[in-house]
């Protein structure tokens, strides 16, 4: 706590002579029970590229989404050129000449490049009809002007992901924004395109005095463009500093900070001889490449990396949801085929998905129904549900997970996030599966429930379960895993074991700057 | 060189529509072999008279499908407007002084207004009632069909033969009136609509409604306009049907709903929305109508008509599944090949 | 203070499903009785229930399909085709049991066809069944060659016309099938899966439930129910006819929606649908008392669906 205050006060170096182009103060945002941003601030001056850094869920994306009107803030103010402005919709942001490019695309696949660039802003003829000739002519001129080699008549669906991202950027640039937001906008771009974008950014800031808010998980990119940086952590503002003032080590330290009060847990090492699950040269499309991993029996194997590097896909593929294209999968030494979720479950594998509201639970159905959804066979005789068995399964699960409920007949949606997550876990544990794939199970839940889940995981390993544990919170991995696989661009970048499992190793490997630990 | 590229891009964008025209060409060739007067002025006339109603109906359906909705009321609305036209023609004529031309024009205007209002009602239910289009139009379909029976409890009505001759005949002895009407519908309704911001918005709304909203598209206005245009198309179809049958029949079994959906899908529209084109739908509609004609030429029992049309609809809707399946297989094979190369 | 509490209770009573349906039935019954005292007689009640039984059995299928998030638009010719199969097969073979077996077999085939289209080919359920209706229409005409042959058998006529302890057999059949359906939905693993699939096929997939099999199973059961309804209708009418089931298309959906099953799937049940079926026929008979022509009834049926959906289908959509 006091660490944060100190750092915040220490290094707020800013050019006092100027009025910030865009400024936010005391911004707060909650999603249901989850705090996404609390009392946060940020200032971007004309002519600078301001980078926002932090781990997944630290609040940096929420901040820029609030500025461009995609997310509506709960509290706080936004100022532009010193004047307070109201941004309550994307249109408001548009009016204030704020444009944004996100990792998720907002393009219409069935329309052409030019039609997308001009969407809802098409030039009209004298009769009020859209002037398609002008659209293509103007688009061509504009693309030439900014130096992009794209055919304006091409349909977006026929472009590569990289080209689509360029169209998205062109669309934002065409609005001639005063503030340009680039949120992981480079993730799909190749080297050449990134170079182009950085040149463009330089022109906007240094020649035209615009402001750019830039988010990227690649350290090398930040080094090239950043003028100043703001660090977020756990939904809070930490500090702002001129780029170059802090070294990489210091930055990593501030990003990670001290998290949830970590408990001293044993890190189950698992059996030395028994392998529960093994992958050999497994690959899937363009997202996973040549994965070799062994999960020891009774182990919690950590999966780390920044989001979008294939971790979620790995867990889903192991459970048969989007199977591997290549490679082999072995359960307890025997090769298995897993084409779908039912085969995975039959082989003793169960997944606890990261998106509990859409993938894990049916919020409108009862707690009991959700708990027994994967174990209907176990609680019924010849297809007819046995009331007694069902009651026992539900009661056991509620007791074991200490889910706080009045009645198991209430809809799951009425529970708090933490208790909902417990139901998802209970649902998976009601099956006979002993290999549990946990995909970011503590996302957005309270600290109390978190530590309950940690303890449960350790307990499970003692009962013969083996766990693959993907988490976006590095601290959790440090606490629970003796072995951690760090993912980078669909590959296992590093396998850390024992003393190698440190926050610094994990973070540096996941942003692709540390190769020496291997 | 540049033209070559443009042609390629056009073909890429409208591939399904182009395929639909190829199928249509095959059907036309078959027609040419079977219809004795195909190459006289009667040939085009009879063909256009066969296809015009479904062409217009499928245009309306395409608009709704583009918004990722579906219109199950179109068949009933066509019959309703048909019954209204057949019933009010003579009374209206008498009101305007017995002139059947003035009466005809007044009737058509009234019917078109009714169509737009009916479409607007559908649109309001979808936009302001926040109900699923498919259920709304199922229910309003019943209402329109009831209204048709209310207006015309029994089949009949009086329509001057001049009215029928005007809509089904030829202009200057050569050009079929149906062809001219189709052209007029396209030039006066479709092209201006397609080139309005509301029309352009359909693709964005159907493709990705959230993105459309974030891009500042006026979704409610665009949807309401779309349902009005669909209603207008159904009403035009009702007028043409009146001219062709010279009566209104509330009990007539009609396949307009089924076939308009099938025509749009054959022409490249996707029921998921955001994809489709009017000229593709027209090709689809022509093909479907002419296949019925072929069945008649080949003396195949009319009992097969629905079977053939139903199967065409299902096949057209399955194309997406099969292409996705093939693509998945291909990609997997590619991944395996790459892996082998690497190893 | 007391008054407001009472009001709240009343409001709750009117908005929760069961009491609302009972109240609607009572109100409609009373209004019909006041307008036409004959309608209060037990014999008339029974004749209403007989009509209800055919729609009720069709609605078993419609309820299951709507619970999975679809709707069956092939009711008209699923019922008619099955009825024609029964009548004609029975006539040609002279054996009612063979006719029955053939009809059930056709029901299963119809269900497989629709189910595979929806579950495997992923065609929108309503469009798939719309196309199926056209196909079945052709099948009906091709099978009969435009001449309806056959008639009811003694047994089937007895089912529709005879009574046991003052209750017609077809009503008893409806009750029995209804109880089975309620049991299926509430007390079996398959029933659980139907609700789950209707809520989210993504969740059921990730819960290792065979979503496709559940969907196909539902369409098969539904089509068999429609086949059974077709047979009973023959007993009621005496012989098949091409338009015998046209009216059932829309009112089957209306009954399910009135019964409180969400048109978006995943919530509801058959008990409510049974109430919805009774309400539909009370409204129909009220319209007959009011001398409303067929045109009026069609308009009312469509309007009922819209009004019911606007009244409580919308709220569910928002929360879902």
Image (cartoon, rainbow, N blue to C red):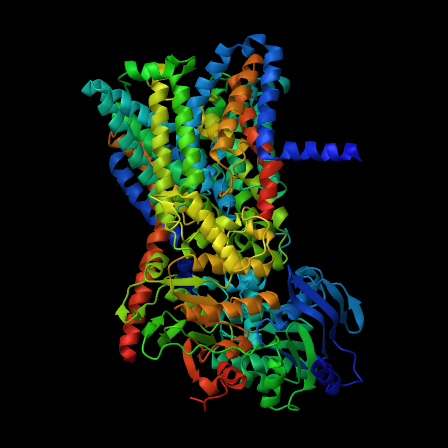
Q: Looking at the image, which is closer to me, A334 or A282?
A: A334
Task: Determine the image quadrant of residue C29.
Answer: top right
Is A149 situated left or right of B342 in this image? right
Residue at 56 percent of width and 49 percent of height: B199
Residue at 74 percent of width and 35 percent of height: C5
Q: Position of residue B333 (x, y in %)?
A: 28, 67
**In this rendering, does residue A517 appear at all?**
yes
Task: Determine the image quadrant of residue A492.
Answer: bottom left
Residue at 26 percent of width and 40 percent of height: B30
Q: Looking at the image, which is closer to me, A349 or C100?
A: A349
Q: In which quarter of the image is the N terminus of chain C?
A: top right
Is B300 situated left or right of A262 in this image? left
Using the image, determine if residue A60 lies above or below residue A123.
Answer: below
**In this rendering, does residue C246 appear at all?**
no
How many numbered circles does the render carry?
A: 0
- Which residue is at the far top? C38
Q: Where is residue C257 in the image (x, y as percent from the top left)?
A: 52, 34
Q: Position of residue B291 (x, y in %)?
A: 32, 37
Using the image, determine if residue B209 lies above or below residue C223.
Answer: below
Q: Looking at the image, which is closer to me, A137 or C195?
A: C195
Is C62 situated left or right of A476 in this image? left
- Which residue is at the far left? C93
Q: Where is residue A355 in the image (x, y as percent from the top left)?
A: 51, 61
Using the image, determine if residue A512 lies above or below residue A333.
Answer: below
């Amino acid at each position: 706590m006091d660490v944060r205050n100190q750092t915040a006060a220490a290094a707020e170096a800013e050019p006092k002579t100027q009025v910030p182009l865009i400024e936010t103060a005391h911004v707060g945002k909650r999603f249901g029970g989850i705090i996404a941003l609390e009392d946060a601030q940020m200032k971007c001056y004309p002519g600078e590229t301001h980078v926002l850094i932090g781990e997944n869920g630290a609040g940096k994306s929420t901040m820029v989404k609030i500025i461009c009107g995609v997310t509506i803030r709960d509290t706080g103010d936004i100022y532009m050129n010193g004047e307070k402005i109201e941004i309550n919709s994307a249109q408001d942001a548009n009016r204030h000449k704020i444009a944004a490019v996100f990792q998720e695309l907002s393009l219409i696949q069935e329309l052409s490049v030019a039609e997308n660039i001009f969407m809802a802003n098409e030039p009209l003829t004298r009769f009020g009809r859209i002037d398609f000739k002008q659209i293509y002519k103007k688009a061509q001129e504009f693309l030439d002007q900014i130096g992009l080699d794209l055919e304006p008549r091409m349909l977006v669906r026929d472009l590569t992901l990289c080209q689509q991202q360029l169209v998205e950027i062109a669309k934002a640039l065409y609005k001639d924004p005063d503030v340009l937001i680039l949120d992981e906008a480079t993730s799909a771009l190749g080297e050449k395109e990134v170079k182009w974008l950085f040149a463009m950014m330089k022109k906007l800031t240094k020649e035209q005095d615009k402001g750019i808010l830039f988010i990227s998980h690649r350290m090398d990119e930040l080094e090239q463009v950043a003028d100043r940086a703001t660090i977020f952590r756990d939904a809070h503002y930490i500090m702002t500093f001129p780029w170059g003032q802090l070294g990489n080590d210091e930055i990593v330290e501030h990003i990670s900070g001290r998290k949830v009060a970590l408990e001293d847990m044993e890190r189950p090492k698992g059996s030395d001889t028994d392998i529960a699950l093994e992958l050999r040269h497994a690959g899937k499309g363009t997202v996973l490449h040549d994965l070799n991993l062994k999960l020891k029996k009774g182990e919690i194997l950590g999966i780390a990396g920044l989001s979008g590097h294939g971790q979620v896909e790995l867990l889903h593929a192991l459970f048969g949801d989007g199977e591997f294209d290549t490679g082999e999968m072995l359960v307890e030494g025997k090769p298995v085929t897993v084409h779908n979720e039912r085969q995975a479950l039959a082989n003793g594998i169960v997944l606890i998905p990261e998106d509990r509201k859409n993938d894990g639970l049916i919020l409108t159905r009862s707690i009991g129904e959700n708990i027994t959804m994967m174990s209907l066979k176990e609680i019924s005789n010849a297809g007819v549900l046995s009331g007694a068995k069902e009651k026992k399964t539900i009661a056991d699960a509620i007791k074991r997970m200490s889910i706080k409920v009045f009645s198991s007949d209430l809809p799951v949606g009425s529970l708090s996030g933490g208790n909902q997550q417990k139901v998802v876990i209970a649902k998976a544990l009601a099956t006979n599966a002993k290999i549990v794939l946990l995909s970011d199970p503590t996302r957005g839940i309270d600290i109390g429930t978190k530590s309950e889940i940690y303890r449960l995981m350790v307990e499970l390993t003692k009962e013969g379960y083996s766990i693959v544990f993907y988490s976006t919170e590095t601290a959790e991995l440090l606490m629970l895993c003796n072995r951690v696989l760090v993912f980078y661009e669909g590959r296992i970048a590093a396998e850390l074991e024992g003393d190698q499992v440190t926050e610094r190793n994990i973070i540096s490997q996941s942003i692709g700057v540390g190769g020496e630990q291997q | 060189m540049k033209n070559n590229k443009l042609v390629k891009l056009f073909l890429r964008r409208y591939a399904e529509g182009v395929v639909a025209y190829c199928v249509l060409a095959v059907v036309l060739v078959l027609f040419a072999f079977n219809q004795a007067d195909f190459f006289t002025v009667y040939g085009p006339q009879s063909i256009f008279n066969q296809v015009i109603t479904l062409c217009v109906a499928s245009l309306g359906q395409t608009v709704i499908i583009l918004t990722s909705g579906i219109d199950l009321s179109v068949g009933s609305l066509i019959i309703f407007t048909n019954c209204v036209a057949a019933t009010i023609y003579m009374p209206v004529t008498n009101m305007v002084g017995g002139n059947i031309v003035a009466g005809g024009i007044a009737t058509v205007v009234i019917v078109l207004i009714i169509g737009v209002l009916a479409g607007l009602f559908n649109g309001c239910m979808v936009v302001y009632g926040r109900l699923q289009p498919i259920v709304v139009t199922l229910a309003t379909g019943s209402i329109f069909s009831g209204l048709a029976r209310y207006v015309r409890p029994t089949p009949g009505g009086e329509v001057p033969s001049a009215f029928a001759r005007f809509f089904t005949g030829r202009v200057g002895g050569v050009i079929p009136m149906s062809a001219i009407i189709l052209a007029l519908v396209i030039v006066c309704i479709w092209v201006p609509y397609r080139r309005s911001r509301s029309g352009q918005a359909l693709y964005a709304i159907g493709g990705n409604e959230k993105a459309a909203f974030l891009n500042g598209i006026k979704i409610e206005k665009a949807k309401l306009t779309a349902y009005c245009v669909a209603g207008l198309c159904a009403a035009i179809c009702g007028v043409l049907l009146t001219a062709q049958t010279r009566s209104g029949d509330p009990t007539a079994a009609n396949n307009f709903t089924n076939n308009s959906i099938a025509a749009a899908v054959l022409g490249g529209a996707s029921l998921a929305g955001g994809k489709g084109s009017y000229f593709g739908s027209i090709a689809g509609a022509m093909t479907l109508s002419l296949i019925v004609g072929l069945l008649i030429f080949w003396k195949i029992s009319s009992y097969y008509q629905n079977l053939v049309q139903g199967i065409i609809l299902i096949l057209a809707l399955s194309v997406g599944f099969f292409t996705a399946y093939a693509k998945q297989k291909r990609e997997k094979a590619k991944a395996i090949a790459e892996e082998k190369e690497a190893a | 203070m007391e008054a407001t509490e009472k009001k709240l209770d009343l409001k709750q009573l009117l908005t929760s499903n069961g009491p609302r349906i009972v109240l609607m039935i009572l109100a409609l019954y009373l209004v019909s009785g006041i307008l036409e005292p004959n309608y209060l007689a037990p014999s008339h009640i029974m004749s209403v229930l007989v009509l209800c039984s055919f729609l009720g059995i069709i609605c078993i299928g419609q309820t299951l399909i709507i619970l999975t998030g679809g709707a069956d638009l092939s009711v008209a010719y699923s019922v008619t085709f099955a009825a024609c199969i029964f009548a004609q097969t029975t006539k040609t073979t002279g054996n009612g049991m063979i006719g029955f077996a053939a009809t059930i077999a056709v029901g299963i085939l119809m269900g497989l066809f629709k189910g595979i289209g929806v579950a495997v080919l992923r065609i929108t359920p309503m469009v798939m069944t719309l196309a199926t209706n056209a196909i079945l229409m052709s099948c009906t005409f091709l099978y009969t060659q435009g001449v309806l042959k056959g008639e009811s058998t003694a047994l089937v006529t007895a089912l529709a016309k005879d009574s046991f302890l003052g209750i017609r057999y077809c009503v008893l059949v409806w009750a029995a099938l209804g109880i089975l359906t309620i049991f299926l939905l509430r007390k079996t693993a398959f029933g659980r899966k139907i609700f789950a699939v209707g809520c989210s096929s993504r969740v059921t997939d990730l819960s290792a439930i065979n979503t496709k099999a559940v969907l196909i199973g539902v369409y098969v059961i539904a089509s068999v129910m429609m086949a059974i309804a077709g047979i009973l209708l023959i007993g009621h009418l005496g012989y098949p006819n091409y338009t015998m089931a046209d009216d059932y298309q829309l009112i089957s959906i209306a009954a399910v929606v009135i019964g409180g099953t969400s048109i978006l799937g995943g919530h509801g049940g058959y008990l409510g649908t049974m109430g919805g079926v009774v309400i539909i026929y009370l409204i129909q008979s009220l319209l007959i008392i009011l001398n409303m022509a067929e045109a009026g009834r069609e308009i009312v049926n469509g309007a009922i669906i819209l009004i019911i959906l606007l009244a409580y289908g919308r709220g569910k959509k928002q929360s879902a």
